[in-house]
Every structure is written in structure tokens, then in C-alpha cells.
Image: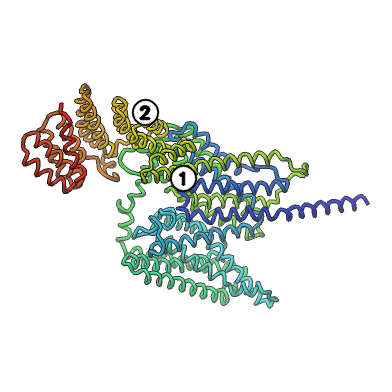
Amino acid sequence: MTAKKKKSKKEVTIKSSLKDKQEFDWLHQIAFWGLALLLFFPPYFRGLFFAPEQEKALMFATLVFWLTFLWRWLQNDHKFLRGPLDWFALALPVVYIISTFTAVNKGYAIDEVVKNILYFLTYWSASRLVRNEEDVHKLLHVIYVSATGVALAGLATATGIVHIKDGFNGTYISSTFQYHNALAAYLGAVLFIGFYLWNCANDRQCDALVNKLNNTKETVDVKLARLNPTGYLYACGNFLLLAVLIGSKSRGGLLVFGVVFILYLLGIGPKRRLTGLLMTGYLGAVSYGVTGKFISLVQNGQHNTAWLWIMAGIILALAGQLAFDLLNRLIFGRWPGDDKKFITAFVILAAIVIVATGIWITGKPQITEKISSFEYLKTAFHRFYYMESALNMIKERPLLGWGGGGWKEAYEAYLSYRYTTREVHSYYFQVGVETGIAGIIIVLGIWLSFLASACRLFFANKVNDTNRQLAWLFTVVFFMLAGHALIDFDLSLSAITLVLWSVVGMTYGLQRAVKGEKRSQAKQTAGFAPLVAVTVVSLVVLLISASLFNAFNLYNQGISYLRANNAARGVESLEKAAAYNPFNANYRIALSRVYSGLGKSDDAVAEARAAVDLSPYSFAVRNNLVKIAIASGSHELAAGEIENTLQLAPNNIEVYEEYAQNYVNLGVKELTSGKKEMVREYFKQAINVMQLINNRVQSLNEKDNKMWQGPRLAVNGKIKLFAGQAYYFMGNFTEAQKYLQQASKSGKKEIKGQALVWLALLNEKKGRVVQANKLMDQANKLTPEFAQKYPDLKKIPLL
């Protein structure tokens, strides 16, 4: 009797538990589809590369996270972190927060904190909201449909239907990501999702055909599976993804995709290995031919014809799927469970592909020469030198790094030759620069914990083939994104990183669901402390994100007011922007320039100094302080800061140009104010810049010169213009004429026009009025605005 009562009581408890779960299912659905939106839309917001979009995404992600936690809390699940993967995932934003205190640019550091909190919240939500394979399939379809839209957007911007800045540059497609290598990594990863979904549809068709052969009674679902309509949709979608992937012309992206595709084939089983190679090879051939023709037609302005080729590709994809259906009906459907036949067929097909490829390459030696040439591999070599510079920065700050954004703040001071890249082009080295060895260890811990979770999912239930295939899919998507991130900055685009973290979360969530993790029944009542703590933290994150985003809007508003000549409203908006985000150096720079224009010299210098404190390694920020100091009469401050600019970017010719110009302006300011003590020294420094350039050029080795990107270090027309001015004010007319005449031969209209004005001034000082007038006539045609300053320039005294 007692046993019966206990059994009855247990049944009631189970039913009550199930009822509670169903009662709050609506909350799960809201959070789940909120997560789906978070995965769907980011690619359409410039890949979520820029801080304002990331801040908006974080606000939405925080809401999804809070709803997810509330749903788990209502189910008496209070444990926030459950395993190594959870702990490592949380450790990454924590180490970014800690590194902020020693960051060289706190504004950039806060942006990186925002990104990494966004990734953690997405991971945590995905790992808790996924309950079964059905949930996983829903999220995979969301990612897949979003990527297909990105591919179509790329084709649309190439043909002028929509305008996406940098979406198509005339040669390759970048779509909404505005960077073709990132697009390739993203589409490559989602293509594996497309292959998985296509294989699922293909498996359902084969099972339905087997049922028909066995004379099993067919349901409506089975009949539909036999027709396989979804297979045709996936074939079209995969064609579009593959076509735009090829159209991105990303060498690294295509290389990593090829390597990971081989890995993908190894783990999907004999049957899928054969069918996957067949269909992917067919779609690849179609996509290659169609994309080449599409881009060629677009370049010639034949947009309608280009779209006809895309439609032809879709028709060929449908035809290929139809042929594949026939193969299923006539051959593959009759080989159920016969792995040997599939393996044999795959080996024969693979051998044919390898031999054919070898023959094709042998017949075209120019291809081998091209891909092994320095010009072809130059970008790859650049990556290694970026990493070398990053390694030098890590060595200087090994513990916690330079803080978020440390690379783009300080990298120019660590270059052996000139190049411009605000990203390291390697996620791992960038993490090392920003967070030191601690960050690298954490990322390594995340990746190893993920792979361990995927392995457990793969081997947990050998009977459940779907789980095994999902585990393998998650692994290859991970290798596609994490692998390409080794050689590029894909993970700086948060839309891509969100896909990666959602895959990591889905893996862990599904692994826990399969494991059947049980929560402790010791406490049947939910304590409010966890909910209160999470709610408070969520509100803090929301408020900070909203404050940062509001500051950005106020800054843009202020700039708009200033352009409309409404200085009062402009200053008000900029001051509010700086109050909402006091760590952004750009807001301080804008305020310093406005204050300087309004004659508020002390305020201008204070804001310019504040900007330098926030961004001490930026040449542009320090150069702004120099100009503000000169305009405000703080000449000693200006002179000291001019010398500090050279070390910030010693390979940048603009630094030397500004160095010379600033010293000339400083000397002129001293002359006009009657203070001549330091004037000669200032003009000598302006002239000495030519020697500084030559010294730097001589220090460059062969590798530096070969790898150089951008304008070369040379005594150019602009430098000669400033040297001529300095000699003029020093009274050395012979040297002044020499350099001004050389500057007047510059190919740049502005430099040539200004040089002619100074030559006219020089000739007038020598009494050659007719020659001076002729020079001014020429100057008026080139730079009429500067020519109008001629009377004022004459009034400036000479030494």
C-alpha cells in the first residue's frame, strides 16, 4: 500500500513538473525567437563591425538573455555556470574588462568589452534555449536563410538594384559585410549548414524510397519526403551561397573552405560522403562558370543579362537536383546499409577528380607560376609581418596587453615598414595584443572545451545519427570560422562571431540535453537572489550600452548643427556626447576645435589634452593638440608635442609633412607676435625634417622596401614647400627660391599653387614686381582662395 502511494505521489510530481514546463513554454518561445532575430539581422548592419550597431545588438541580446534566465529560473534552474566552457566563455569579457583599467585607449577598450559581453550573452542564451534537435534545426535555418539573403544582396548591389557601400568594387563581391574576405568566411561556414540540411532532405527521400520498396504503408509526410521539395530549395540556396563565395574572390577564404570541406567529408559517413561530393562538385562547377560570366557582364554594364545567367544557374541547380533524385530512385535507394558500395563509388569518384585536376594543372603551368609568385602571395606575406609586429607588442605588455583596440591605437609605432591596417588580421594575435597571455589562454580554453563538448556529443549515442551529424557540422563550422580567423580579422565583424558563438552554445546545449542533465530537487522553491542579481547586471549593461549609443547620436547631432552654422546647439550636443561617453577621444577633439573657433582657448587646449590622455599613441590626436596649442598661443606646449609626433608613426610621410608645417606655423606665430627668441630654431626644425626623412629611409632594409604599402618616405613637394617658407622667413632667399621652385613643379595643384604664391612674394621682396604679378596670375588659376591671402602674407615680418 505504501509503495503504491509513493508511486502515485511520484507520478503526480512528474505530471506537475511537466505542467510547469508547458506553462512557461511561451516564455521560452519569446526568448528563442529573440535569439533567432539576433542571428538573422546582424549581417545586414554592415556585418556588425561598427560600435554603434554593436551597442544596439547588445541591448537586444541583454533582453534575450534576461528572458532566457527568467525562463530557466521559473523551472527551478538557478545555476548560472555549469562547466569549463561556461567559465571560459565568461572569462573572456571579464579579462577584457580588467584590461580596460590599463588600456592605452579606454574608448576602444570599452568597445571591445561591449563586443565580448554580446558574445557571451549570445552563447549563454543559445546553450540554454536549445532543448533538442528541433530547436537546433530552427536556428540553423535562421542562419541559412539570412546568409542566402546576404548572397542575394551581394548580387543585387553588383547589378545596381540596391546600393551597399563597398558591397561590390567592380571585381569582387563584399555584399553587406563590405569586406570580401569576411564574406567568404561567413558564406563558407553557412554552406556547411546548407550541405547538412540538403543531406537531411536527401536522407528523408532515401528512407521514403526504401519504405516504398518494402511496400510499407505511406503517410502524407513520407510521400512528401519521396518528392523531396526541400531538396530543391536547398540546392538553389547552396548554389547562391557558393556562387557569391566564389564571387568574393577571397584566396584565403576559398583555401580554408577547401581544406575544411575535405575534413567535412571525412566525418559524414560513406553515403553522405559520396552524395556530398557529387552534389557539391556539380554546384561548384556551375557556380564557377556562372559567377565568372556574371562579374564580366556586370563590368560591361549588362546587368539584365547578368541576372539571366544567375537564373540559368538556378535552373541548372534544379536540374542537378532532379538528376540526383533519379540517382536516389534508381541506385542509392537500392543500397540501404551497403556502405561498401558507397565507399567504392566515392574512392573511384575521388580518384577521377584528383587525376583530372592534376592533368588540368599540368596543362596550365602559368597557373602554378602565378600562385607561387611574390605578387600573388604578397598579402599572405603581409599577414606574417602584421603578426610579427603584434608579437612585439605582446612582448612589451605580456600580462594584460594593451587593452581592447590596443593594436589600432599603437601599431604604427611598431612597424619596420609602412602599411595601414587597423586590425591585426589574426584574431588570436589581436586577442594577445589586447589582453596579453591571459586572453590567449582563455581563448584556447574556450576552443578546447568546445571541441571536447562536440566530441562528447558525437560519441554519446552512436545510435542517434542526427546528433552525430550535428556534432560534426558544428565542428566543421567552427574550423571554418576559427581557422580563417587565424589569417584575417573576420571575428572583428560581430555578425560572424555571433554565428560562431551560437554554434558553440548549441553544441553545449544539445550535449547537455542528450546527457539528460538533472537538476537538484533539494530546493523546490525558486530563490529570488539569482534573479535579482541577473536583473541588476542586465540593467547595468543596458544602461551602459544605451549611454554609449546615445553619445554617438549626440555627437552626430552636434556635427550636423555645426555644419548648419548653429554653434550653440552644436557645442551643447557635443558636450552631452562627451558626458555620456567620457572615454571617446573623437568627441574631445571635436569640442577642442569648436572651442578654438569660438575663441575659448583654455577650454580648447583642455579638451585637446584630454583627447591625448585618452589616445596617447594616435598621431592624429596629438597633432590636433599641436594645432590647438599654436592657435591658442601655447607655443611651448606646441613645440614639445611636435617632437612627440615623430615616434608615433615614423614610416608615415604625413607625420613629417605635419611636423614641418607645424614648425613653420609656430615660427610665423612667434614672428607676428614680436617674439623672436625661438623663431630661428623653429624654422631650422622645419628644414631639418628633410634630414630626418633621409635618415629613416636609410634605415630601411630590402624587405621593408619590398613590402612597403602606401606613400613612400621621400622629400616631396609639400616638404619642399615648407622648407622654402622657412628659408624665406629666415631671409635666405637663395635657398627659399630653390625649394619653392622645386615645389612649384609638383603634380598636385594645391602644392603648386601655394608655391607660386610664395615665389611671387619672394620676387616682390627682390623688387621683381612684373615677375611676381605673372606668378600670381598662375597661382590665381590654381588656388584662388590661397592667392587671396597674398596681402596678409606680405605683412608678416622676416628675421
Residue drawn at (43%, 39%) of the image: 574
Q: Earlier in the sequence, mark 2 or mark 1?
A: 1
Q: In the displayed structure, does residue 27 sit left or right of residue 754?
A: right
Q: Residue type at mark 2?
A: Asp
Q: Residue 224, relative to residue 636: is it above or below?
A: below
Q: Which residue is mark 1?
A: 553
Q: Which residue is mark 2?
A: 602
- Assign a secondary structure to mark 2: helix
Q: 28 or 315, which is in the foreground?
A: 28
Q: Residue furthest top?
A: 677
Q: Residue 419, relative to residue 10: is it above or below?
A: above
The x and y percentages for residue 392 are 39, 35
- Assign a secondary structure to mark 1: helix
- Label placed on residue 126: none
Q: Residue 178, relative to residue 107: is it above or below?
A: below
Residue drawn at (24%, 37%) of the image: 697
Q: In the displayed structure, does residue 442 sit left or right of residue 567?
A: right
The x and y percentages for residue 323 are 51, 75
